[in-house]
Amino acid sequence: MTFAILVGGLIQRFVPTRHGIGSWVWLFALSLISNGLAVGISSGPCRILPGTGSPNGKFALAVCKLDKKDWRTNSDGLTLDESLFIIGLKPRRTLQEISESYRHSSSASWPKYKAAWSADSSHLAAIVRFRRNSELTGYALTNGQWARLNLPSFDPIEDMKTVLKREEPITGESEIVAAKWHGVLELRVQAEAYIKTEPTAEMTVTYAYNFGQGEWKLKVVDRRTRNE
Amino acid sequence: MRVIQLGSVGSDVANWQNFLGTRDLSPGRSDGEFDIDTKTATESFQEEAGLEADGIVGRDTLAAAVALGFQPAPDISKTLEIKVPMDIDVDGAPNAYGPPGKPTLDFELNAHEGATSSGTIVGYIVIRGRPAIQQDGDPFPGYFISTTAFQDLKNPNSLDPRKYVDASKINYVVRAHIAEVNGVHLGDIVAVHSLRHNSSVFGIVGDTGHSSGAEGSLALLQALGYPFTSGKTGSVDEPEIIVRYFPGSNPDRHFFRDQAQIDSEANDLRLSKDFSAHH
């Protein structure tokens, strides 16, 4: 990463010149980026996730290879060698890792990703679908930097257990099926929860995040349970 | 309900035979085959109802029967198709999850919310903070117990792995939301086709948890020709799998013990796994 920043600095220093050294560094840096080696937070190839681009065409979500020094091994013995990033598209560069907790193995099937952008491309809800549930992380572009929003978390399975007064044993899954910004002060999220121990049941729940008095608050807007 | 007559076969015929039997019209065995006994009994019913006695169960005969309490079987001629990519589901397999050191079909962390060890375990049964363990006599003693939404309702033991649909042996799909809206129930039969391999198989709706319907059992994907051996790696990333749902095709929620039973039932119901129109 240090090397990448150094190259970035060199680009800034030399690109405006018309001398040979500036052109050489520019070409060298371009080759790094085209190989996915980015200037900024992460180094390593990035894979832009289809359908995650911002409305203004400037940003997208991408899965990027981590620096080898940042690799860790989890309790299943998997090497966590990739993570989810916001990347800039013009020029292409990594801007912000969504969360260290989303680091995963490039050899595993999961997780999967979606993005919900505000219409002005200033706010992002990054949705990460794990095998059993989805999580959502919000970001806002402030003064050219992507800052994480302090969004309270929710757990549709726990909500469903509470509503249905269910105790252990519970097996199930949940998923965020949609997220939509209304301006930049409200984010609505629709989730599905499934309980797979008898009596099986399903629930659709709509959450709303609202920003007011300096903080994001979470409330349940609608909740519908179904039995087979 | 479709028009049924001499030569018709299916669960709707068996349903009709049952009805005739309740009226002491001697339709023969309720075996789902519309034979000469069923035709004669049908003609007797039509005479009683003041209808033309042609032995064909059409609209008027059906209406007369419904007025007497007959409940037609759902119309399984109405199908619903979706085209999706497909993730691998190993839920319900008795070796899906187990303690460290045992070979399993999925990563243990995939049973946790957030795929981290601190996440709540929802992928196998946990009682008072400890995994329920399969006992001697169970399919995989020492392993954990993975569940599916479709279950053997005649088996009251929720800790019996056989209560759930074994993803390693049974072709099943996860029910799409659009299918639920269109009357597809857990246990209903599906036909599934791979455009890549030009292969088709029967299966059931065995689980929930993925509203797009883009998830199927390990056995299903293997049967379609994909080289997967577990739920740990791989998926069908392109929308090349067609799932044809047959709403109402398992009204009794019969629990199938093996794939041969599903294939047999699908054939008895004359369900189609012909997808040639897609090529």
Image (spheres, rainbow, N blue to C red):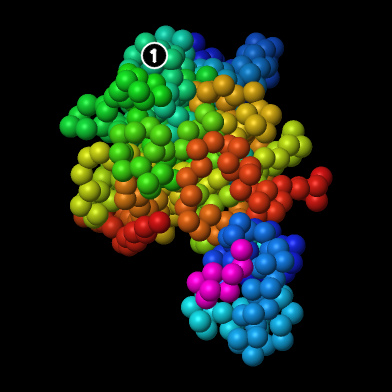
Label 1 Cα neighbours within 10 Å, binned few <14 / some 14-19 / many ≥20: few
Expressed as whole percent of the image width and height from the top left, the position of residue B126 reads 26, 32
Please, which residue is most extreme toward the left here?
Answer: B128
Residue B32: image quadrant is bottom right
Report the quarter where the C terminus of chain A lies.
bottom left
> Residue at left 28%, top 58%?
A220
Q: Which residues are magenta?
A: B21-28
Q: Which residue is mark 1?
A: B102
Expressed as whole percent of the image width and height from the top left, the position of residue B233 reads 54, 23
Judge whether A67 appears above or below B175 on screen: above
> Residue at left 40%, top 51%?
A192
Expressed as whole percent of the image width and height from the top left, the position of residue B103 reads 43, 15
Residue situated in front as seen by the camera: B258 or B30? B30
Instruction: Identify which amino acid the numbered label 1 is placed on.
Output: Lys
Magenta region, mostly helix, strand or loop? loop
Residue situated in front as seen by the camera: A114 or B34? B34
Judge whether A224 appears above or below A29 on screen: below
